[in-house]
Image (cartoon, helix red, strand yellow):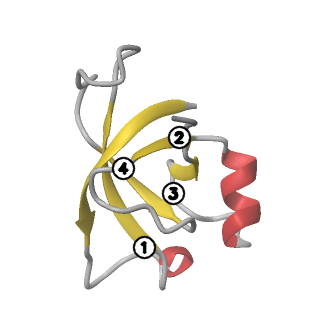
């Protein structure tokens, strides 16, 4: 799991069938200080309704993602797991 900040939305006219209908977010991973960027932004699916500017917790747990999407053949790597406490 990593902490990140939603920096934008992503759209795609053609995508894998397993993510059809899912909201795609562009998320900037953050360092432990919760402010400094850590690497390149990531693309993640969101089922919790995160908005631009919010901090989120991401997971790359494959089993969780497969269960969430209901498919074993999905190319999704990251998903929003929750929101950090203030």
Q: Hey, which residue is sitting farthest front in the picture?
A: 86
**Between marks 1 and 3 in the image, the one whose residue lies nearer the viewer:** 1
Above or below 86: residue 14: below
Q: CA distance from mark 1 to mark 2?
A: 16 Å
Residue corresponding to mark 4: 54
Residue corresponding to mark 1: 23
User: Percent x, y for residue 21?
Assistant: 48, 85
Q: Answer with the quarter of the image where residue 26 lies.
A: bottom left
Q: CA distance from mark 4 to mark 1?
A: 15 Å
Other residues around mark 4 within 10 Å, as few (<14) / some (14–19) / many (≥20): few
User: Percent x, y for residue 18?
Assistant: 56, 76
**Residue 51 horizontal side relative to residue 70, left or right:** left
Q: Are marks 3 and 4 in contact (CB under 8 Å)?
A: no
Residue corresponding to mark 3: 76
Q: CA distance from mark 3 to mark 4?
A: 21 Å
Other residues around mark 1 within 10 Å, as few (<14) / some (14–19) / many (≥20): some
């Amino acid at each position: 799991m990593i902490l990140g900040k939603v920096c934008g939305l992503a759209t795609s006219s053609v995508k894998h069938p397993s993510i059809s209908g899912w909201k795609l977010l562009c998320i900037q991973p953050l360092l432990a200080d919760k402010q400094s960027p850590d690497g390149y932004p990531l693309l993640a699916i969101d089922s919790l309704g995160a908005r631009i500017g919010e901090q989120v917790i991401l997971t790359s747990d494959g089993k969780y993602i497969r269960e969430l999407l209901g498919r074993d053949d999905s190319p999704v790597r990251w998903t929003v797991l929750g929101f950090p406490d203030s």
